[in-house]
Image (cartoon, grey):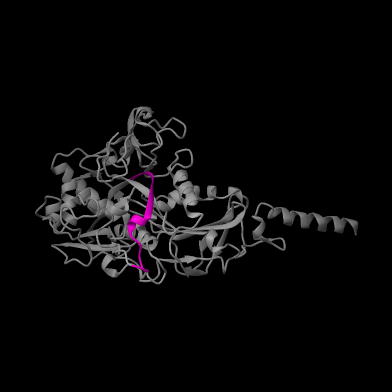
């Protein structure tokens, strides 16, 4: 009998110990579950770009008093896969931070300047966004599963949601550099002016031109015909002027025969571009079309609502995955015989990494002979594939890179917003906090910068040699 009592006592202690690291407000009757006790003031809703999700997830737990006790929350089967939350104790109180990247940078800013949830009606189809009224619907703690995992890796799923205005937004480019027309003008009771926002620079983010296998092979053939040396690994190059012409209303290139300088090529082309709300699309317009400070440069950017030109079609996607699905041929279904597909992705995307099903087939190409992902390595004195896809733009050799920012409301503002925004931007910008793909840190001076050497320990070679001085229209300078 005594042995049974001892065994029962040990089992009870073991059960309690299993949840000892949970926040105190997440423990109910010995079970680790989330209680819906977070106040509105202690709930932070962050909107913005899909490319910034990796940066947010890398540092989010550090926003809380005890990072190991934080519970990472994902959505259930309803609505969103572009949303994640973190629940724990901050300043001694239950605190919830939610990040949702549906619609991209522009959609995030539109939510941020909304005065009410009723004022925000979603990005219309003319801008290639998601259904009206869904982007600003964020998770709540009303309906959640039990917490599983151990310290530093607790997880749960919540399926309840409610409309919210955003407290801050993570963006690929500055507000003034977004595609013209996607932000509504200030109006009493509906939207505040963008001048009511404060901005903090977080780092330098790279972008690249990606193509499907069919176009990759065709570019290889073109480079060989024209005497353009292939890069390491046989990587071909595309002229920035040619891609600019393909995507611009003012450009003459709309046929494969013109793009590849081959009169016999009669293949169709599909541009897998992002919606106008996307920061990636804004970056593409900045780089290729000279769209500066929110004004059109070399013609407008063609999209699905534009009249298709020649043998080129344009597919719009609100998120990065939409563009990758297009490049992979998942959607829309290619015609018999296939077609060339091309678009712009941020460099945090590595082809087929992690391995997905179906297997990704798209690849990055060089722009004007400069590779985004192959770089010279002092360790071995050879050009190698950069696992972080940042050395080329971090060195300044590859120019397609822009400063990312965090924006937050300053009028009106929650008491906690400024503190969270400042801390979050600081965590993202510090090379000691993370090791992000396609992202270079700005916390090192020009004189300290060195060539890439894969044998050196972190955080060496994470920082950028130059910057754009908080204005992406400026040159990338040391």
The residue that appears at 14% across and 63% down in the rendered structure is 309
Q: Is residue 211 visible?
A: no
Toward the viewer: 220 or 383?
383
Is 365 placed above or below 181 here? above
Q: Quadrant of the N terminus?
A: bottom right
Q: Count of labels shown?
A: 0
Kindly give the residue lying farthest to the left in the view shown. Answer: 263
- Is 135 situated left or right of 474 in this image? right
Question: Which span is picked out in magenta?
Answer: 188-205
Q: Position of residue 414 (x, y in %)?
A: 49, 58
Q: Position of residue 381 (x, y in %)?
A: 34, 27
Q: Position of residue 389 (x, y in %)?
A: 36, 42
Q: Position of residue 343 (x, y in %)?
A: 26, 54
Kindly give the residue lying farthest to the right in the view shown. Answer: 1
Toward the viewer: 134 or 270?
134
Task: Place residue 31 in its image quadrant.
Answer: bottom right
Q: Quadrant of the C terminus?
A: top left
Toward the viewer: 136 or 364?
136
- Is 156 situated left or right of 212 in this image? right
Asked whether residue 371 is drawn in magenta, I would say no
Asked whether residue 194 is drawn in magenta, I would say yes
Is 246 placed above or below 440 here? below
- Is 199 situated left or right of 271 in this image? right
The residue that appears at 36% across and 50% down in the rendered structure is 351
The residue that appears at 44% across and 38% down in the rendered structure is 431
């Amino acid at each position: 009998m005594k042995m049974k009592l001892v065994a029962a006592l040990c089992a009870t202690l073991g059960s309690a110990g299993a949840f000892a690291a949970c926040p105190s407000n997440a423990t109910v009757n010995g079970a680790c579950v989330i209680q819906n006790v977070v106040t509105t003031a202690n709930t932070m809703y962050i909107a913005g770009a899909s490319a910034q999700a990796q940066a947010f997830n890398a540092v989010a737990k550090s926003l809380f008093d005890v990072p190991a006790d934080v519970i990472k929350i994902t959505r259930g089967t309803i609505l969103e896969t572009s949303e994640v939350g973190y629940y724990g104790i901050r300043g001694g109180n239950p605190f919830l931070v939610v990040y949702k990247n549906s619609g991209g940078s522009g959609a995030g800013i539109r939510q941020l300047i909304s005065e009410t949830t009723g004022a925000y009606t979603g990005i219309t189809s003319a801008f290639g966004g998601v259904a009206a009224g869904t982007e600003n619907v964020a998770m709540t703690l009303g309906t959640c599963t039990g917490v599983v995992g151990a310290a530093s890796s607790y997880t749960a799923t919540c399926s309840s949601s409610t409309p919210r205005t955003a407290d801050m937004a993570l963006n690929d480019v500055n507000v003034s550099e977004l595609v013209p027309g996607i932000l509504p003008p200030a109006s009493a009771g509906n939207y505040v002016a963008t001048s009511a926002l404060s901005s903090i620079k977080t780092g330098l983010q790279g972008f690249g031109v990606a193509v499907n296998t069919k176009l990759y092979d065709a570019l290889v053939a073109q480079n060989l015909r024209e005497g353009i040396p292939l890069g390491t690994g046989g990587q071909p190059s595309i002229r920035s002027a040619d891609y600019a012409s393909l995507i611009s209303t003012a450009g003459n290139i709309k046929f494969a025969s013109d793009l590849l300088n081959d009169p016999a090529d009669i293949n169709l082309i599909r541009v897998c571009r992002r919606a106008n709300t996307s920061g990636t699309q804004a970056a593409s317009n900045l780089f290729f079309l000279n769209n500066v400070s929110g004004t059109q440069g070399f013609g407008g950017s063609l999209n699905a609502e534009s009249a298709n030109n020649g043998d080129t079609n344009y597919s719009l996607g609100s998120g990065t995955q939409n563009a990758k699905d297009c490049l992979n041929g998942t959607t829309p279904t290619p015609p018999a015989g296939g077609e060339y597909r091309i678009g712009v992705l941020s460099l945090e995307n590595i082809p087929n990494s992690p391995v997905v099903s179906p297997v990704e087939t798209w690849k990055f190409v060089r722009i004007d002979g400069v590779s985004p992902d192959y770089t010279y390595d002092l360790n071995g004195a050879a050009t190698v594939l950069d696992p972080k896809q940042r050395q080329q733009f971090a060195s300044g050799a590859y120019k397609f890179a822009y400063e990312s920012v965090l924006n937050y409301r300053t009028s009106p503002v929650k008491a906690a917003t400024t503190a969270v925004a400042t801390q979050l931007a600081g965590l993202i910008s510090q090379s000691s906090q993370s090791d992000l793909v396609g992202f270079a840190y700005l916390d090192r001076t020009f004189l300290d910068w060195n060539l890439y050497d894969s044998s050196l320990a972190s955080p060496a070679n994470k920082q950028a040699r130059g910057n754009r001085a908080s204005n992406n229209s400026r040159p990338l300078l040391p």
